[in-house]
Amino acid sequence: MSLEVKIEKAKELHINKWRSARKPMLEQLDALYFIISVDDNAPGVILEAIARHKQNLRDVTKYDLSHIQSVEELEKVWPECLSNGLL
């Protein structure tokens, strides 16, 4: 098995870690969005912020890892939206 194949597999596994990290965040944001959207007086900017954050979390798997050449480099990559909490 070539080194290139191994780094591609490592990238795939790393992105799966991101999926695992974002899952509870998306669930919490879905619940928060629902609770806030039920209130007719809720500011739309809050719902928009939640929707933007959810989209950022969904887009995390589109992160460009093509420049990564080693597992050590890969381990240093962690999208900011997965580190900042809900909002």
Image: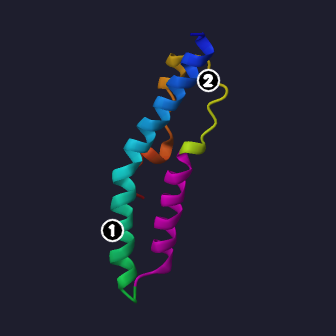
State the residue lying farthest toward the bottom.
Answer: 40
Residue picked out by circle 2: 68
What quarter of the picture does the C terminus occupy?
bottom left
**Residue pictured at 60% horizontal, 10% vertical:** 2
The number of callouts visible is 2
Residue 31's disc is 1
Range covered by the magenta-colored residues = 42-60
Q: Quadrant of residue 27?
A: bottom left
What is the crowding at mark 2: few (fewer than 14 residues within 10 Å), some, or many (at least 20)? some
Q: In the rendered image of this protein, does residue 42 appear above or below residue 80?
A: below
Q: Amino acid at mark 1?
A: Ala
Q: Relative to 71, is 64 on the left or the right?
A: right
Q: Quadrant of the N terminus?
A: top right
Where is residue 69 shown, x and y percent of the image?
A: 62, 18
Task: Tell me residue 32's x, y (percent).
Answer: 34, 69
Q: Check the image and name the residue furthest to the right.
A: 67
